[in-house]
Amino acid sequence: MDTQTPALKGEGIALSFGGIKVLKDLDVEFRAGEITGLIGPNGAGKTSLFNTLTGAYRPQSGKITYAGHSLDGLSPAARADKGIVRSFQHVALSPDLTVLENVMIGVARNHHAGWIHAFLPTRRGREEMAQMRAAAEAALADLGLAGAADKLPSELPPGMLRLVEIARAIVGKPAVLLLDEPAAGLNNSETRDLMGSLRKLASPDLVMVVVEHDMDLVMSICDRIYVLNFGAFVACGSPEEVRADDDVVRIYLGSDDD
Ligand SMILES: Nc1ncnc2c1ncn2[C@@H]1O[C@H](COP(=O)(O)OP(=O)(O)O)[C@@H](O)[C@H]1O
Ligand SMILES: [Mg+2]
């Protein structure tokens, strides 16, 4: 194993609901420093794989490790403490909080041990609050959202709301960032901007995985792509390899969802 490059790995992951196999003995490796795409038709099992990696679903068999350490048996909160963070398919921001406050919640949510003190009327509390604010401002700036900090979510277009969600996910400096259909509901230019922002977020220490069922979209930003169909991988490789794969071509020409 290459110890220089941490990776989120699953081996032999099997998940079923009521006898229906949703994930079939999957082996997967998401490496730091790469953006990995996870694509496949609706119902293929992409979200279920994320749920399994974050601990929301418990697989019937298989093991999951990050940087060589087992995550098996750890709750989603314990995995978030280890820096394994996800965004959801649907935007879930608090409508009464400003953009900045929404992102500050992410500091508390994503493994920041001192956050509770931020709400105490003490000097330490004020310092913690100032740090949370600074971290949130930096995350917003990283995504080009500095100007939106004091706005309410209802004042922003959908594309920017997606970015706010991502700011909230990255504010705690995650080790692993799992993005479930971040471009859902966005128009073409918003999607292009989002992909550019994700590309800029990529860093040598960060494992980034983007779920998307539009192949062209992930082709443009991903280093490697896994293609999932009916709970099994049908292809994995560079965008060029995946694009040329007969099974992938068949799946994508054969199905016409969205
Ligand atoms: N909690 C659950 N209970 C029962 N079936 C589920 C559950 N979660 C997912 N599934 C099933 O697993 C399959 C894969 O779903 P999902 O992971 O959401 O696919 P994708 O994200 O690729 O569209 C679907 O058939 C779905 O109905
Ligand atoms: Mg899904």
Image (cartoon, rainbow, N blue to C red):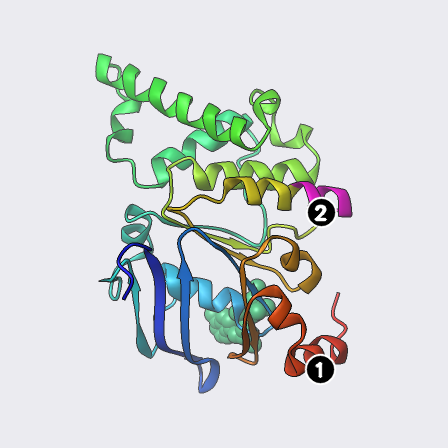
User: What whole-number distance in Å separates the C-alpha atoms at marks 1 and 2?
Assistant: 27 Å
Task: Between residue 163 and residue 78, name the one nearer to us.
Answer: 163
Kindly identify which residue carries mark 2: 186
The residue sitting at 61% across, 72% down in the picture is 242
Residue at the outermost top position: 123
Report ligand 2 position as a quadrant: bottom right
Q: Which residue is mark 1?
A: 250
Element carrying mark 1: helix
Asked which quadrant contains residue 7, the reply is bottom left
* Three-letter amino acid code of the residue under disc 1: Arg
Is 87 left, or right, of 172 in this rendering?
A: right
**Label 2 lies in ligand 2 vicinity (Cβ under 8 Å):** no
- Numbered label tally: 2
Q: Dot 1, how many residues are within 10 Å of its Cα: few (below 14), some (14-19), or many (20+)?
A: few
**Can residue 41 be seen?**
no
Residue lying at the far bottom of the rendered structure? 19
Q: Which residue is rendered at x = 26% and y = 66% of the image?
A: 72
Q: Dot 2 surroundings within 10 Å: few (below 14), some, or many (20 or more)?
A: some
Q: Position of residue 104 (x, y in %)?
A: 43, 29
- The region drawn magenta spans 187-193
